[in-house]
Amino acid sequence: MPTILFAAPSLWPEYREALPQALAEAGLAGDVVTEAAPDQVDYIVYAPSSPLQDFTPYTRTKAVLSLWAGVERVVGNPTLIQPLCRMVDPGLTEGMVEWVVGHTLRHHLGMDRHIVNPGHVWDPTCPPLARERPVTLLGMGALGTACAAALRGLNFPVTGWSRTAKPGCLHGEDGLRQALATAQVLVTLLPRTAETENLLNADRLALLPRGAVILNPGRGALIDDAALLAALDRGHIGHATLDVFRIEPLPPDHPFWSHPQVTVTPHIAADTRASSAARVLAENIRRGEAGEPFLHLVDRQRGY
Ligand code: NAP
């Protein structure tokens, strides 16, 4: 019977029942504990904010299973030599799709004009149809692919860009230029890595059509903050809706809070949901026990 150390203390109340239940549903007997002798631990359920930072004593641990989708805070830990799996959770994906579609529709339909209309102005300008509003997604992984499908379902023409070549998706520097050039709405769903840091710098922001809207639920470091503010100030970027920031919580004096063309959401685009995430953990533990390959393994070299 494997010993599973739950090493994300603040999340324990959510998983205390959900994880043993998911293990039972997967036909597994497992001992889920919040404390154990390191050399007795088979699996570690982990969050990067955990006090556990030195994995050296966990000599028999078969895998570290992160509850977070983004792994930039743990992938460079030199003591973590065990397989590291990130969270790909159907509940989290659903949440991200809803956030991206909701904020795309807000801008597409010009909802703000009608929600905040103190002068009671009768402006009968009709918004274009979705089919006339190109959307670009930077990052076509688990989340980007699901968001693209939902947006295409509403008839938005969607261009995707990823690191590697894949059908129907642009890649490389030329692909990025092409993807930016048409983006009336730009959604960034990339991981934070050395390659993606400041990907949207002044030069690349300038490639977007005038008035483009940016939605960033990926990571704050994907965008050069100063370049974004400058592009907003001169009206080149019409609006930025930002869920993630270099420093979180966003400091009270950060200019994003007060900029009239910026909407701040407090890293709530998509949360891991215990009910569905527990099943993902159980499936990976089942795989580990059966000697099958783990799902959602992180590649240390590429950093995601
Ligand atoms: P994923 O499945 O690993 O997908 C990442 C995508 O980014 C892939 O398409 C990948 O390309 C692409 N990519 C990576 N590096 C690239 C580069 N240098 N150039 C071009 N494309 C690159 O990740 P995911 O599950 O979709 O999650 C994406 C990110 O969303 C996470 O890393 C996290 O930062 C963020 N997130 C935010 C929230 C929130 O609440 N705001 C919640 C969850 C996740 P390939 O397909 O070619 O590998």
Image: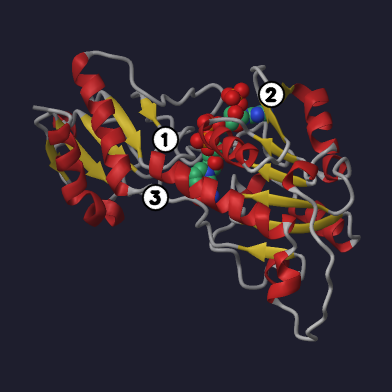
Q: Nearer the viewer, mark 1 or mark 3?
A: 1
Which residue does the image show at 49% across and 40% down from the upper left?
A: 70
- Dot 3 corresponds to which residue? 49
The residues bearing labels 1 and 3 have C-alpha atoms spaced at a distance of: 18 Å
Is residue 111 left or right of 88 when viewed as pictured? right
> The residue tagged with tag 1: helix, strand or loop?
loop
Q: Nearer the viewer, mark 3 or mark 2?
A: 2
> The residue tagged with tag 2: helix, strand or loop?
strand
Q: Would you say the residues marked 1 and 3 are in contact, meaning their CB atoms lie under 8 Å apart?
A: no
- Dot 2 corresponds to which residue? 169
Q: Position of residue 121 (x, y in %)?
A: 82, 81
Q: Amino acid at mark 2?
A: Cys
Vertical position of residue 98 compared to residue 304: above or below: below
Label disc, if present, on residue 88 of the rendered structure: 1
Q: Position of residue 76 (x, y in %)?
A: 49, 33
Q: Amino acid at mark 1?
A: Val
For residue 304, say whether it is visible. Answer: no
The residues bearing labels 2 and 1 have C-alpha atoms spaced at a distance of: 21 Å
Question: Is the residue marked by circle 1 packed among few (<14), some (14-19), or many (20+) residues within 10 Å?
Answer: many
Q: Is mark 2 within 8 Å of ligand 1?
A: yes
Q: Amino acid at mark 3?
A: Ser
Tag 2 or tag 3, which sits nearer the N-term?
A: 3
Which residue does the image show at 39% across and 44% down from the upper left?
A: 91
Vertical position of residue 273 compared to residue 300: above or below: below
Q: Is mark 1 within 8 Å of ligand 1?
A: yes
Tag 3 or tag 1, which sits nearer the N-term?
A: 3
Which residue does the image show at 41% across and 26% down from the upper left?
A: 296
